[in-house]
Image (cartoon, rainbow, N blue to C red):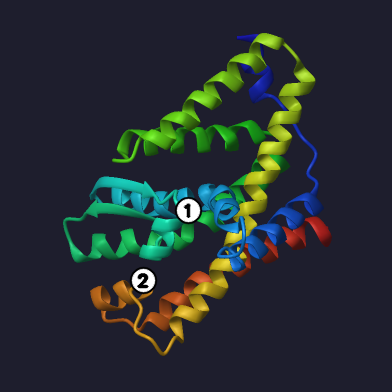
Amino acid sequence: MTKVNAFFSSSIQLHLYWIIFIAILYIVIHTYRNKSINPILDIYFNYIPVLTHEFGHILFNKLSGGKPRDLVIVATPSERLATSQQGFAITQSKTSLGQSITTFGGYVMPALMLFLGFLSIKYQYPSLFITAYLLMFTYFLYLTSRKLLPIIIVILLVALLYCLFQSDNQRMILYIVTVTQHFILGVLLGEVLQSSWTIFKLTFSENRVSWDGSTLKELTHIPTFVYSVIWIAINLFTVYQLFKTYFLP
């Protein structure tokens, strides 16, 4: 119990430049994801952002009275290339309003989790943020129809946590919490910035592409542009608030 308390009471120092570096690396790898080993690195780096985005659909589906059916993260470069999908959520909604809320939630979630992650450091409870992702991953494991890779990840996580708590090394616990927190925040920041550009491109693309914005247009008869502006505004406002807090105190 003492070790668990030590984990949850861990306080870390925020290194904003680490987060910015990881975010830039994330964007570069994603931009050149079809080069050399980048397809593998892209999957590694955006596993958490994709989980966050798709879990946003699941969460908003539950909040609107729907029923989630499946959550999949595409974990092979060949399938991503063939389907142009990084992941997908299958949900069931009772009404078109519920389906609209479900669809809207995907692009909101990364910015929300990024903001909560910074708050957890500010108020010295970073372990709660990491725990939230562990719970998110646990639900993903329960729901997904593709369980092999998540089970392997769980086994590795359990082994890591077991060794960590058995060693009774408080410094190592702090190090793991620090690295994990900064990595998650870095890839989320990269995703928030990169997805804003993706939303912009999809909105003004001359080719007809099926994505969350076009789905919302069909469901609500409100132009895609409106939703794109809202999503990008949420993303940029979140980034602005974070940089305002830490660069312009």
Which label's residue is closer to the chain start, 2 or 1?
Answer: 1
Can you give x and y, in whole percent of width and height, for residue 32 in the image? 61, 67
Front residue of 39/52: it is 39
Can you give x and y, in whole percent of width and height, for residue 107 in the image? 46, 62
Q: Quick check: can you spot residue 30?
A: yes
Residue found at the very far bottom of the displayed protein: 206
Q: Quick check: can you spot residue 123?
A: no
Can you give x and y, in whole percent of width and height, for residue 20 in the image? 75, 57
The residue under the point 66% across, 37% down is 180
Up/down of 169 relative to 24, above or below: above
The residue under the point 46% across, 48% down is 51
Front residue of 156/11: it is 156
Q: CA distance from mark 2 to mark 1?
A: 15 Å
The residue under the point 33% across, 76% down is 214
Would residue 95 be found to the left or right of residue 136 on screen?
Answer: left
Image quadrant for the C terminus? bottom right
For label 1, the residue is 50
Up/down of 215 relative to 165, above or below: below
User: Tag 1's secondary structure?
Assistant: helix
Residue found at the very far left of the displayed protein: 94
Front residue of 199/35: it is 35
For label 2, the residue is 211
Would residue 59 be found to the left or right of residue 31 on screen?
Answer: left
